[in-house]
C-alpha cells in the first residue's frame, strides 16, 4: 500500500477476481464492502486516513473492450499494474479520448447505450459535473434526458447512495435546480411536483418549490461560513455535519439538505384560505408522515429517519418561541431536549427558513429575533448546560395530588397537554402549571 498517494483506486481483474479481492483485503488488513453490481470495495486505513480500492471483473475480451463499456470517457482510462514498476514510464490506455475530455473538463458518455446499461449513471453525471466543476457535453445531456424514464427501475439503495452524494457537495441547490428543470428529480421524489403548485401568502415571497430550494441554498451558505452560523465553533460544526450516519447517507450535511428540501412538504395537504390570509395549519404533522414515507421509500435507516423526523416535526418551533415576549430557560431546555437527535440541523434550518421567507424590511425584526434565539440555543447546546438532564415542570404524582384523581388515562392526557404548553412556551415554571391545574379542577 505504500506506493499509493491517492485515496481512491479502481482495479479490473480476471476470472478469479473475487479470490484476489479476499487475498488483497487479508494482506492489507482492509474491510470488504459489496459496493455495487459486480463491484467490491476494500477500505484500508493507512497513516490515519481511509483509502478505498474498488475491484470489478473484466467485461469483454480485453481491457479496451472493458473501458468502452464504462460510463464516461474520463473514467475509461487505465494502465497496467506492471507499468507502475516500469522505469520507462506509464502507458495510459485511452480508447475514447478521455484524457482530452479531462483536460477540457467535459463529461462525455461512452456510448449511446451508456444510460441503458445503467440508468444510475444519469445521477452520476450531475454528481461528477458538480464535484469537479465540469460541463456536461450537449449530446450526453440530450441522451440522459431521453433515458431518464429508466431511473426508477434502479435499486433504491443505489439511488440513495448517489442522491446523498450529490446533496453532500457544495451548491447542492444548483444541482437540484438542474434535476428539477429536466424533470429528473420528480422520478425519484414525485411529491415535489406538487410544490410548484402551492402558492404561499405574506410574508412568503415565493411558491413552495422556490422557497424550499432557497432554503437549501441558504443552508449551504451557513455551513460553508460556519463562524457566521455559530460563533467560535467552526471546527465543531464541520465535524458534526461531516459525521457518517449510515450506508448510503454520506453525512449529516447531505441529510440536512434533504430535510431542508422537504421541511414544508406538509403544506401540499394543509393549504387553506382564511379571508385574505393563506394558512397551513398542522403542516408539520402532515409533513412528518409524508417525509417518513419518502424516507422509507429511499430505504433510509433508523438513524437517518430519526434525524429527518426531528427536523420536520420541529422546524417551526424556534420561530414560534421567538414570537414570545419572554422565553424562559425552561422552554429553551425543553426544545433542546426535543430536538436532541438533530440539534444543530434544527437550528440551522430555522435560520435558513426564515431568511428564505422574505427579504422585505418589514420582516427584518422576525429574522433578527430568530437569529438571536438560534445563537442563544447554540450557546446553550455547545456549553456544559447541554449535559444537564431535563426535569419536567410537574410529574404524574403532582397532577394526582392537585386534581385529586387516581392514576390513569386522565393523568396521561394532562401530562401531554402540559408538555405541549411547555413546548409552546405557555408554561415556564412549576408554579404556572400548578395554578393552571387548580383552575382546571375548579372549573370541573
Image (tube, rainbow, N blue to C red):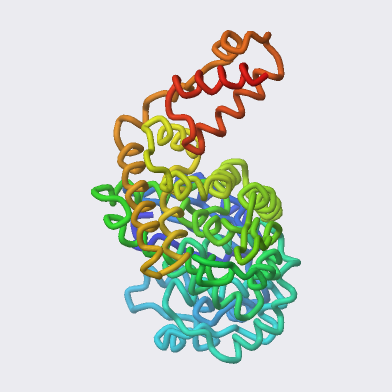
Compared to residue 144, the image places residue 320 above or below, namely above
Looking at the image, is 96 positioned above or below residue 150?
below
Check the image and name the residue furthest to the bottom: 139
Most extreme residue toward the front, as rendered? 443
Picture coordinates of residue 357 (x, y %)?
Answer: 47, 65
Image position of 416 (left or right of 85): right
| Percent position of residue 184, x then y | 65, 74
| Residue at 35% from the left image edge and 38% from the top image edge | 381
Of 409 and 175, nearer the camera is 409
- Residue at horizontal 54%, vertical 78%? 76
Residue 123 on image: x %, y %:
60, 71
Which image quadrant: the C terminus? top right
Is residue 22 in view from this perspective? Answer: no
Is 308 left, or right, of 231 in this rendering?
A: right
Q: Name which quarter of the figure residue 325 lies in.
A: top left
- Can residue 225 be seen here? The reply is yes
Quadrant occupied by the N terminus = bottom left
> Based on the displayed image, in which of its 4 quarters is residue 382 positioned?
top left
> Which residue occupies the foreground of this view, 422 or 82?
422
Residue 202 in the image: x percent, y percent?
Answer: 52, 67
Q: Quadrant of residue 276?
A: bottom right
Which residue is found at the position 41% from the left and 47% from the top? 322
319 relative position to 312: left or right: left
Between residue 300 and residue 261, name the one nearer to us.
Answer: 261
How many numbered circles are shown?
0
User: Looking at the picture, does residue 52 appear above or below residue 395?
Assistant: below
Amino acid at each position: 500500500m505504500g506506493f499509493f498517494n491517492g485515496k481512491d483506486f479502481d482495479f479490473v481483474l480476471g476470472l478469479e477476481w473475487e479470490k484476489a479481492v479476499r487475498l488483497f483485503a487479508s494482506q492489507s488488513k482492509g474491510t470488504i464492502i459489496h459496493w455495487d453490481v459486480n463491484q467490491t470495495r476494500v477500505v484500508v486505513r493507512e497513516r490515519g486516513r481511509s483509502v478505498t480500492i474498488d475491484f470489478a471483473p473484466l467485461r469483454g475480451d480485453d481491457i479496451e473492450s472493458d473501458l468502452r463499456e464504462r460510463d464516461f470517457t474520463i473514467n475509461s482510462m487505465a494502465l497496467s499494474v506492471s507499468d507502475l514498476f516500469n522505469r520507462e514510464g506509464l502507458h495510459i490506455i485511452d480508447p475514447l479520448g478521455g484524457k482530452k475530455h479531462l483536460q477540457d473538463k467535459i463529461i462525455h458518455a461512452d456510448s449511446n447505450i451508456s444510460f441503458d446499461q445503467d440508468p444510475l449513471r444519469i445521477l452520476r453525471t450531475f454528481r461528477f459535473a458538480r464535484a469537479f466543476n465540469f460541463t456536461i457535453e450537449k449530446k450526453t445531456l440530450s441522451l440522459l434526458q431521453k433515458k431518464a424514464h429508466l431511473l426508477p427501475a434502479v435499486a433504491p439503495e443505489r439511488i440513495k447512495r448517489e442522491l446523498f452524494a450529490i446533496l453532500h457537495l457544495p451548491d447542492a441547490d444548483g444541482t437540484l435546480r438542474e434535476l428539477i428543470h429536466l424533470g429528473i428529480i420528480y422520478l425519484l421524489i414525485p411529491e415535489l411536483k406538487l410544490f410548484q403548485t402551492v402558492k404561499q401568502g405574506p410574508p412568503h415571497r415565493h411558491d413552495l418549490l422556490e422557497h424550499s430550494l432557497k432554503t437549501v441554498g441558504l443552508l449551504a451558505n451557513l455551513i460553508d461560513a460556519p463562524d457566521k452560523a455559530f460563533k467560535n465553533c467552526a471546527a465543531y460544526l464541520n465535524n458534526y455535519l461531516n459525521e457518517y450516519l449510515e450506508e448510503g447517507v454520506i453525512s449529516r450535511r447531505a441529510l440536512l439538505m434533504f430535510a431542508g428540501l422537504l421541511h414544508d412538504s406538509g403544506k401540499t395537504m394543509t393549504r387553506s384560505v382564511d379571508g385574505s390570509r393563506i394558512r397551513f395549519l398542522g403542516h408539520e404533522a402532515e409533513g412528518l408522515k409524508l417525509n417518513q414515507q419518502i424516507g422509507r421509500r429511499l430505504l433510509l435507516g433508523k438513524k437517518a429517519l430519526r434525524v429527518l423526523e426531528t427536523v420536520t416535526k420541529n422546524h417551526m418551533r424556534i420561530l414560534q418561541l421567538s414570537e414570545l415576549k419572554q422565553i424562559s430557560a425552561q422552554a429553551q431546555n425543553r426544545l433542546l431536549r426535543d430536538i436532541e437527535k438533530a440539534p444543530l440541523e434544527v437550528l440551522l434550518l430555522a435560520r435558513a427558513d426564515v431568511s428564505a421567507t422574505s427579504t422585505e424590511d418589514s420582516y427584518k425584526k422576525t429574522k433578527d429575533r430568530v437569529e438571536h434565539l438560534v445563537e442563544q440555543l447554540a450557546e446553550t447546546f455547545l456549553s456544559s448546560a447541554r449535559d444537564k438532564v431535563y426535569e419536567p415542570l410537574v410529574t404524574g404524582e403532582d397532577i394526582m395530588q392537585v386534581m385529586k384523581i387516581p392514576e390513569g388515562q386522565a393523568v396521561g392526557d394532562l401530562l401531554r397537554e402540559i408538555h405541549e404548553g411547555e413546548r409552546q412556551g405557555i408554561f415556564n415554571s412549576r408554579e404556572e402549571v400548578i395554578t393552571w391545574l387548580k383552575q382546571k379542577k375548579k372549573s370541573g
